[in-house]
Structures are given as structure tokens and as C-alpha cells.
Image (cartoon, coloured by chain):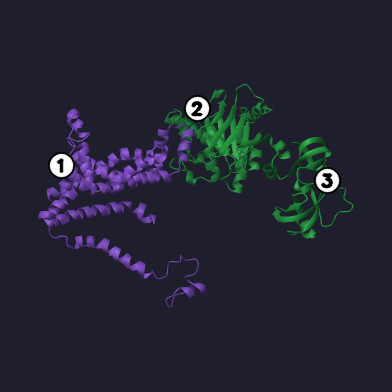
Chain colours: A purple, B green
Amino acid sequence: MTESAGTTPTPPGTDLAAAAPRRPRHRGRMVPVPLLVPALIGLAFLLLPLLALVIRAPWSGLPQQLTSPEVWQALRLSLLCATSATVLSLLVGVPLAWLLARTDFPGRGVVRALVTLPLVLPPVVGGVALLLAFGRNGVVGQWLDAWFGITLPFTTTGVVLAETFVAMPFLVISVEGTLRAADPRYEEAATTLGASRFTAFRRVTLPLIAPGIAAGAVLAWARALGEFGATITFAGNFPGRTQTMPLAVYLALQNDPAAAIALSLVLLAVSIAVLAGLRDRWMNAS
Amino acid sequence: MTDTGERKAAMESPAPDGHRSGEGLDARLVVERGAFRLDVALTAAPGEVVALLGPNGAGKTTALRALAGLVPLTDGHLRLDGAALDRTPPESRPVGVVFQDYLLFPHLTALDNVAFGPRCRGAGRAEARARAAAWLDRMGLAAHAGAKPRRLSGGQAQRVALARALATGPRLLLLDEPLAALDARTRLEVRAQLRRHLAEFEAVAVLVTHDPLDAMVLADRLVVVEDGAVVQEGGPADIARRPRTDYIARLVGLNLYRGRAEGHIVRLDAGPGITTTEDLSGPVFVAFPPSAVTLYDERPAGSSARNLWRCEVAGLESHGDQIRVDLTGELPLAADLTTVAAAELGLHPGARVWAAVKATQTHAYPA
């Protein structure tokens, strides 16, 4: 006690007895200034733009802006594509995560690195790569066109593919982490009861990691909803077909800033809604 | 119930290698993992309960996992009721496992946990649930059928795990430290229940434990494993009377020495001789319980004990209402005294004492 009082500058009036062992140490003590100031700057930097969006929003004209068919078209397309991309990511991403977490094959580390590449790759580069693969003259695209008459670029399906490309790694990483944290001995227990490896996965592992899958899916969905670079490169910007909300916002900013703000507010609202939905999982995790 | 118990007693094979009919378990488990090598031969007749007893890291659990098919055999063989299982994947083996911390599926109710096995083995949903309900009923858990595992007590979870393992009708039941996860009071009760359920089980049961009491209460035969190899096997009484390694001697609470017998004298490999009542020759073990040791602060004049050694107290530990004294000196040994005797002798670490053991209290047997 005397030691801590001697080494720590204690503000006058602080009850030393109250600050004694039972309490966590950091409580009731000054936050060091070299940490406090940058922290506040960071906080302000993150919040200020959002605040500006709300301050400058054309509140009076908002109802009219938001009821325009273009907005609803873009929003509807965004939600549809983001959801489709999430479903697609779930269908192939969860098995991929399982493969990475539960099996051992040569080059697994490399595969894992490649899977996470889209996380750091500039989305525009992803769009170009998608064009070269699935474009009309792409490595795979030319055969899709010749054999099945399927064209992917500049279609709604193209939007879904671009969003899946960018969003799926979030899901895979999240689910893989959950799988690694999950006790693999439950799968063993299932196996000794006569379950095949797939049955063990379906009936035991999947329910156990469901929360992790849900969190990964939300992350992927949010990432898909905001996708811009890969989408505009691979799918273009056709209203009603490939023009999602971020694209519409960008376009509106060129000739109708008020509309851009309105659209941005809608996306902000959706994001906040998602955060609120995740509140129980993440906000309380700390 | 008594009926099955008697039948089981009748089927108990007198010697571990006494059955050649192909019934039961016949295995030699060799598993190599880096520097560790497990090489354990294991046989058991139907109805027999075998305990793999050994210190941590001896390879007991690896042996169990090899039996279940969760670890591949490097070498050896595994036959159950005459059928080779070496290459059979775990899901196709007629084996039930009770894992150390039970591993009940947390998202399923007790009933669905037990029904899981029958479902996987092809039973319809209703049939599997009916079978599971019957097993839970047998375990006295009918009231908890709808409970999720986290709402079950340790003893209840243990019984659900046992029911789940038995519900598939295994020919080999494996139990990994079945009582280790329980607190002392529950343990007593669950041990008695488990003993009853194992007695009713008509196929082979193998349990792994580091607790000699669990092994001796639950098993018909003990197989002691140290460093991946079998060091001794036999009935509980035999193991308790004639330990062959320091580990087992410590477990059963005996002082154990190895030496060479010449008539009634056993010359120890290192240290003095011990006089015994047995008349043997050649390499032998000598064992005596700590309670057979009498301590004196001065050399006893009138003592008839032939075995008298000069020792020094290395440590004292209270052991129930007794004091366990660790002694070094001519012969390292453990002695049990009453608290009063210890106080009268004024024992403290470093104190010099005389330790005496009567020849009739020792037991010598061929090594």
C-alpha cells in the first residue's frame, strides 16, 4: 500500500483503501496522457465522418429521395446480391474451412494463404482477375459461352460472383477459427458411435460451430453489401441489373450529391441494424 | 441381474491366455509416435473387465484409442470375437467408448445423445429414441431424458455417457478414466453403480485408469502399463500382494525391494539384506507394508526383529490418522506410525532412528 502510494501520483482525495486489492488495478487511476490523446483522436476520426453524413443530410427532401424507384431498385439489388453471395459463400466456404481446419494435406499452408489473398487484394484487381477467368474470352468463360451459352460479366450473376470472391474469405477465416477452437474429440465421439465423418460433421460439428458460422456469414454479408471495386470492374454499372447501392452512391455523387447522401444514409442504417443484430455476440464479448 | 452376474462369474477365464476359442478380445497394439512406442498385448474373455493401470503418459489412453480405431496401429493385430478389426474404420467397429470427460454432445438432450448411436447404425428415429429411453431408464435417468448435458450433474453425465456407449450394443466397451472427472463424494457412488453396470455387461470391457482403487474395484484383471509396455498383469489381489515395479508398489502402498535370495536372506542389489520367512533362491522381490515398520530412537536391545536398519527421517506427512515417515539411510523405506508414536519419538526431518521389521511381516516372491 505504502509502496503504491509512493510510486504512483495519486490525486488528492482518492480513497486508497477503496482502491485496494479487490478492484481491478486500472480502475480509479489516471489514463496515461500519451495513450489518451491518440485514442481520442482516433475515436473522433472514426465518428466525425458519420456525424457529418447525418448533419449534412437533406432531411427535408429525404422522404422524396428515399421513395424514388431508383433507390429501391438499387437497395433491392444490393440486398439480393449480398444475400446470394453469402449463401454461395456458405455452401462452399464452410466445407473449405473444414478442409483447412480438420485435414492435413501437402501445401495446406499455401492454400490457406491463397484463400485469404482476396482479403488484402485490391478489389479492382479482383474484378480484373474475374474478367480474365469468367469473361467472354476468359480462361473458363469462353467455354461457358461456347458450350452452355452462359455469359457472366455485366449480369446480376456477375455481381454475385464478384461479391462472393471478395466476401467468402471473411467467412472461411471466421469458420476455420471457430473449427480450430472447437474440440475435435466430439467428432471422434460421434465416430465411435457409428457416424461417418460426414455425419459427424453434419450432426455434431455443424451445430457446435453454428454461432461462428453465423458471425462469419454476417461479416461476409456486410462485406458483400459494400462491395464496389470488383463489382464495377466485372459486372459494370447498369441500373436495375448490376447497379448496387455503393455504385449508385458513387454515380449520384457526380451529379446529385443530395441523392448520394440519402443513399449513404440508407447503407449506414443497414450497417447499424447489422451491428445491433450482432450486439449480443460481439459487443458483450469484451 | 444376479443371473447375469453369475453367468459372468462362470465365464471368467482363469488365465489371461486361457481362451483360444476366438471369443472376446485378442490384441497386440503397437503404436509408434515419434520417440514413444506402445507395445501392449491384451486379451480378455467375454464378460471380463480389464483395467489398464499406469502413470500418466504410459500410453494407456493411446492403447484405448487404438482399440477404438481413433489411432492406427503401426504393427500388431486386433481381433474381436474372431473378426480382425485392424483395418476397420472406427465407425464400423462394434466398440463403445466412454470418454474421460464424457464428450456428451452439448446441443443434444440426454435422450438424443443416447439415440445418436442407434440412429447412426441404421435405426429409425422412433426406434432409436425408444431404445435410448430404455437405456436411460435402466440407468435411473428417465427423468432427465430431456435435459441438455450442461444441466446434468457429473454422476448423471457419466451414466448418460455409459448409456450412449452401450446403446449401440458394442462387443467391446472402452472407458477412459471413467471416474476422473468426478468429485470424491460422487465418485464413491458412481463407482458402485459403474461396477454394477459392468457386471451386467456381457461383452469385453477395458477401462483405463491411474487410480488403483478404481481399477481394483471395477476390474477382474489388471494390466499395468509403464512407458508403453506391460510390466505386470494379474488379478487385483495378486497385484496388490506382489507388486513388481516401484510404481505399483507405491500405488498399493508397499515398500518394495529387488534382490537375490539365499534361503531366508534376501541380499538387495543395493543395500543390506532382509530376512524373510520364505525359503527361496535366485532373483526375488521383497515387499512389506509401511505399517510393519517399527521405529526406535535408540538401538533396541531386546527386539526380536532380525531386520534392523539405521535410518534418517527425510520427510513426514500426515496420512489419515497416521503419520507416513519417509526414511533414507541403510534402506530407504516408508513407515506408518500413529501420531502419538511420532510425537514420542520426536521425529523431525534429519532425525536419526532405527527401523525394525519382523521377518513374518515381509513377503518374498520370485522376480
x and y, in percent, of residue B176 in the image: 56, 39
Q: Residues within 10 Å of mark 1 (few under 14, many from 20)?
A: some
x and y, in percent, of residue A45 in the image: 26, 63
The three-letter amino acid code for the residue at tag 2 is: Arg
Chain of the residue displaying label 2: B
The three-letter amino acid code for the residue at tag 1 is: Arg
Q: Which residue is mark 2?
A: B87
Residue B340 can be seen, yes or no: no
**Image: A59 above or below B186:** below
Name the residue at the left extreme: A255
Q: Quadrant of residue A10?
A: bottom left
- Mark identifier at residue A241: 1
The three-letter amino acid code for the residue at tag 3 is: Lys
The lab-note entry on whether marks 1 and 3 share a chain reads no
CA distance for labels 1 and 3: 100 Å
Q: Which residue is mark 3?
A: B358
Q: Residues within 10 Å of mark 2 (few under 14, many from 20)?
A: few
The lab-note entry on whether marks 2 and 1 share a chain reads no
x and y, in percent, of residue B16 in the image: 66, 29
The reply, left or right, for residue B43 in relation to residue B157 is: right
* Residue ID at (45%, 28%): B123
Secondary element under disc 1, as helix, strand or loop, is loop
Q: Earlier in the sequence, mark 2 or mark 3?
A: 2
Find out whether the residues at labels 2 and 3 contact each other: C-beta distance under 8 Å. Answer: no
Q: Nearer the viewer, mark 2 or mark 1?
A: 2
Residue B279 can be seen, yes or no: yes
Q: Quadrant of residue A147?
A: top left
